Amino acid sequence: MSRILVTGAAGFLGSHLTDRLLAKGHDVVGMDNRVSGQTENLDNAFEHSRFSFYDHDVTEFIHVSGDLDAVMHLASLASPVFYRENPIKTLKVGALGTHKTLGLAKEKEATYLFTSTSEVYGDPEVNPQPEDYRGNVDPYGPRSCYDESKRYGESLIRAYRDQHGLDVRVARIFNTYGPRMRLDDGRVIPNFVRQALTGEDLTVYGDGEQTRAFCYVSDMIDGLVALLESDIQEPVNIGNPDERTINELAQVVIDVTDSDSGITHEELPPQDPQVRRPDISKARSELGWEPTVSLRDGLAKSIEYFETQL
C-alpha cells in the first residue's frame, strides 16, 4: 500500500482514479482548486478514512506533509470550452503546475505520473498515431494553449528524469468519456447525449467525416494504473483504437438514447484535427493493457449518469 497525491482529483478522470486507488488499498491525497472539477465527484472518496483533500492551486507552492510514494498530475483544463476561455490558466497548469508537482515528487523521492494528451500529435498526418510520431502542431494556433502546455510538460518531465534521476511516467491520453463528465463540458459525447436526451438536433461540425476514437473511463483508469505500476519511463498512448466518424457517433448516440433527434451541421472550428486514433501496440506489449468496453456499452453507462444530471 502506498500514499499517492492526485492533482485534479475533483475532475472527471481524477475522481475515478482516486476511487480506484482507494479500492486498491492506497492512501490518497486529493488536490483541486475546482475551476472545472466538482466536489460531488469525490462523494465516495470522502467516506474513506484513507482520503484527504487539499483545496489548492497547483501553480502555487505545494506542501504536503508526510511521505508520498507517487505524484499523479492530472490537473488541467482539458475541455476546449474551458481552455479557450482560460488560455493563460491552462498554460500555467501545464508549466508551473508541472514544475511544482515535479519538485514535490523530487523532494519525496516519489514516482511521478503525468497525463499528457493525444493533442501533442496535433492534426496528424499519420494514422494511427504511434508514440514516436512527432506530430503536426501549430504552436500559435487557436488550440495551442492546451497543446503546448502538455508538450512543455513532457519536456520538463524528461529534464527532471535526466537531471535528477526522477522515476517518471507519461500517459498520452486519447478521447475519454463516461460518468462525471460535465454536461457543459463542450466535448462531443456530453454534447450529443444532452441534445439527444432533450430532443434537440445533434450538432455536427463540418461534414462529420472527421474521426475520433473513444475510450470508456474505466478502461482509461485501468491503463493509468498499469502504467504507474510499470517501469516504463517513455510516453505511452492510452486510448481505444476503435476509430469512428463523428457521423457514426451521432447515430450511435441517437440509437442508444432511442431519441427522435435529427442532425444539423455547423462550420468546423479552425484547426480541428481530421483524424485521431491511438496506436496502442506499446500499451498492449509492455503493460498488458487494452480497452474492453464497447462504445455502445460505455454510452449506455454514461447516459444513465447524464440523465440524473438533467
Image (cartoon, grey):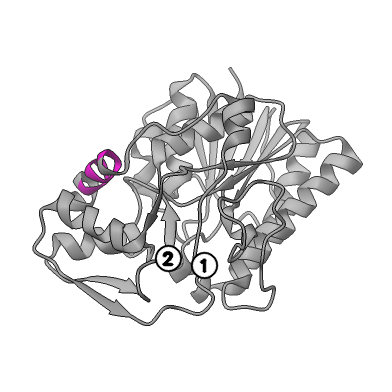
| Residue drawn at x 56%, y 38% as measured from the top left | 280
Tell me, yes or no, whether the two marked residues, 2 and 1, touch with CB atoms within 8 Å. Answer: yes
Which residue type carries mark 1? Pro
Q: Is residue 259 above or below residue 88?
A: above
Query: In which quarter of the view is residue 138 placed?
Result: bottom right
Q: Residues within 10 Å of mark 2 (few under 14, many from 20)?
A: some
| Residue drawn at x 32%, y 57% as measured from the top left | 189
User: Can residue 17 be seen in the rendering of this structure?
Assistant: no
Query: Is residue 138 toward the left or the right of residue 261 in the image?
Result: right
Q: Position of residue 204 (x, y in %)?
A: 31, 71
Q: Position of residue 116 (x, y in %)?
A: 62, 50
Q: Where's the N terminus, which quadrant?
A: top right
Q: Is residue 134 above or below residue 109?
A: below
- Give me the disc on residue 210: 2
Residue nearest the viewer, comparing 90 with 108: 90
Q: Which residues are magenta?
A: 297-303
Q: Which residue is mark 1?
A: 273
Secondary structure that dominates the magenta span: helix
Q: Is residue 268 above or below residue 137?
A: below
Query: Is residue 44 toward the left or the right of residue 130 in the image?
Result: left
